[in-house]
Image: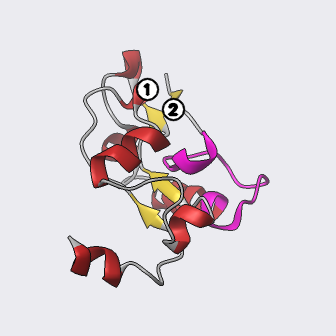
Amino acid sequence: SAAFFKALEGVDAIVDEVSAPDPTIYDFASFLSTYGLTKSSGLKFIKNKMVFRIDFTMGEAMQSLDWYESRIAKPEGAVEGLARVVNEDGSKRDKYFRNIAKGEGVDQVL
């Protein structure tokens, strides 16, 4: 565990892909708890609030991740969504990625 977190010391942003049975309730506190971290951690991605997930866009009835349903057919959406969260660029489309460290929730795609 110590070696893992040591390796993450210079990391600017992280994509958390841990399985969440209900992504609508998985948030920054869930992330911190899962990895045994606190908000006061010295890790760069914690201090700068750059913790992303791939569950921003959900399928019908919030039962599936759009990431697995349309990303391969529309890779430009993945690139644009990642650019939005990494660069904090509101002009980019909200697609796939959300920043849980900044309180972003999930969105349903019909």
Where does the image place residue 51, in percent across and percent down from the top left?
50, 57
Residue at the disc numbered 2: 106
**Callout 1: SS:** helix
Kind of residue at badge 2: Val
Q: Is residue 94 magenta?
A: yes
Where does the image place residue 24, in percent across and percent down from the top left?
43, 26
Q: Which image quarter holds the N terminus?
A: bottom left
Where does the image place residue 45, in percent across and percent down from the top left?
53, 68
Q: Is residue 4 above or below residue 87?
A: below
Kind of residue at badge 1: Thr
Q: Are marks 1 and 2 in contact (CB under 8 Å)?
A: yes
Where does the image place residue 44, in percent across and percent down from the top left?
54, 73
| Separation of marks 1 and 2 at Cα, in angstroms | 6 Å
* Residue at image coords 66%, 58%: 84
* Residue at image coords 49%, 40%: 56
The answer to whether residue 99 shows anywhere in this view is: no
Please state which of residues 78 and 107 is positioned toward the viewer in this rendering.
Answer: 107
Residue at the disc numbered 1: 24
Specify the farthest residue to the top.
61
Q: In this view, does 107 lie above or below 88?
A: above
Specify the farthest residue to the right.
91
Q: What stretch is highlighted in magenta?
A: 84-103
Looking at the picture, the colour scheme in use is: secondary structure
Residue 47 bears which disc, if any?
Answer: none
